[in-house]
Amino acid sequence: MNEKTHMRKLIAILVSLMVFVMLLVACAQATPTDVPPTDVPPTAIPPTAIPPTAVPPAPTQTLIPATASEKCFACHGIENIGMIVGQEAVPIFVDIVAYQETAHRDVECVDCHTDINPTPPHNANRIYGSWARFSVKDTDVNISRNFYSVSADACLACHSDVKYAAFLQSEHATIKDMQYNSDGSPREEITVKGSDGKEYHANENFDAKDCDRCHINTNCGTCHWSSDIKQKQEGNVLDLWTSYDKDSDTAKAAMTEYGMNWTINVASHDFRSAEELTSSNDVCTTCHIGYYKGDMSVPAIGLEGMGIRRHPQVQELALSAQRGIHENMLCTNCHTDVHEMVYQNTEHGARLGGKTQCTNCHQDKAQTVIHKTVTCIACHDAELGVHIDNGMVYPMALKHNVEESWPSHNLTLEVQCAKCHFAGNLVEAPKTITEVEIHP
């Protein structure tokens, strides 16, 4: 055998050895499913080798690979993880599998939570509330939590349609009529001495930002975040609608307070779709509720009339339905522009070119010239008086002890002309009633 032949055989042997070694290494690096669990006995690592308190709970889900969200899920993917607010445990566990089933599954956590320092400790901007309306936040033992850490600005980065941007200036976002008086000054609780020598409270105190429990200013999640909606006290407030004694008012307050508990949805991070919101009045009901409170009409401080406490459009709509008007009506049947809900786009501003007009459905009920300054609800409201606002006749209510235009949903087909036409009326209507054609 010559030297070249010997060398070739030696090289072949070496190559074979290298392939064999590579196969051994590949087997050693195989996934755990390739190795029977009995190969590593459970007692190989003594349970006392690492103190239990030094080992964090293992995530129960597989982390989303190769994304920035992986850092978030390293903690938030731990089942039962939570935080303590006051004496309440608030969950912050996000179920990765459930999240991947949502519409935002391809969105990074920090794309929405833009105002949070991604490295703990976070600087999350959260608001913890209680029941909707005006219950005390910190002492209510039946508390129902709202909290958030996402600004609408982050939502608009993807949802770029102009109607969504308009939401930031809408009544729903700014709650203008609740936070501010008609002259633009902040609404505050003030004390007024009446002609009877007693002190009365006018307006309400909004310093505690109680409205933010639901409206939360620029947070889209107020309506869109899936939440558990619960009535504080079961019952139908219409049963006590015209009762004004102390016990009735206490019951009406509880029946018209709803809590939206957002914490139950943290794990799934699910959102209500437009279809869901426009097929039910459930979310609208949590805010657009309330009751009449007769003692809010105080002659001693120069205010007389039916007092309205809070905003009872839902109950008023039910009263209308009992008269055969707007039966089974959804709020969004009329209010098609909830993202752009500003004065001009309400029935109040309909004659100024707004979108929500009764004639959208009742095309044959346009008014004649003689009543061109009279809104539909001014005539068809079932109970309230009327006044002039911006040159238009509207139903008038006393709300927060202030005379205000009222977007009445308590309607009747029977019109009482004497509501406007009487001596000394405030809407400049002739005191005598002349039979004229109202609708052409």
Image (cartoon, grey):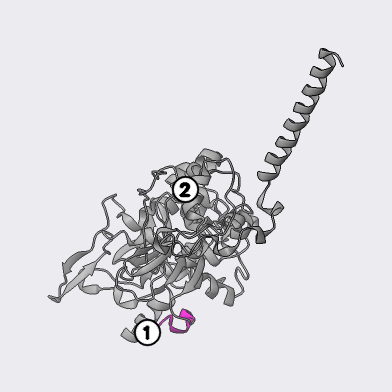
**Residue at 52% across, 55% down:** 77
**Residue at 43% across, 83% down:** 240
The numbered mark at residue 344 is 2
Residue 387 position in % (x across, y down): 37, 61
Callout 2, which amino acid?
A: Gln
Callout 1, which amino acid?
A: Ser
Give the crowd class for mark 2: few <14, some 14-19, many >=20 residues within 10 Å. Answer: some
Q: Which residues are drawn in magenta?
A: 236-243
Can you tell which quarter of the image residue 146 is in?
bottom left
Residue 231 position in % (x across, y down): 47, 75
Q: Would residue 362 appear left or right of 410 to someone viewing this image?
A: right
Q: Nearer the viewer, residue 137 or 401?
A: 137
In which quadrant is the N terminus drawn? Answer: top right
The numbered mark at residue 248 is 1
Of badges 1 and 2, the one in the foreground is 1
The numbered mark at residue 371 is none
In which quadrant is the C terminus drawn? Answer: bottom right
Point out the residue furthest to the right here: 1
**Residue at 22% across, 69% down:** 201
Q: CA distance from mark 1 to mark 2?
A: 36 Å
Q: Is residue 31 above or below residue 265?
A: above
Q: Is residue 12 magenta?
A: no
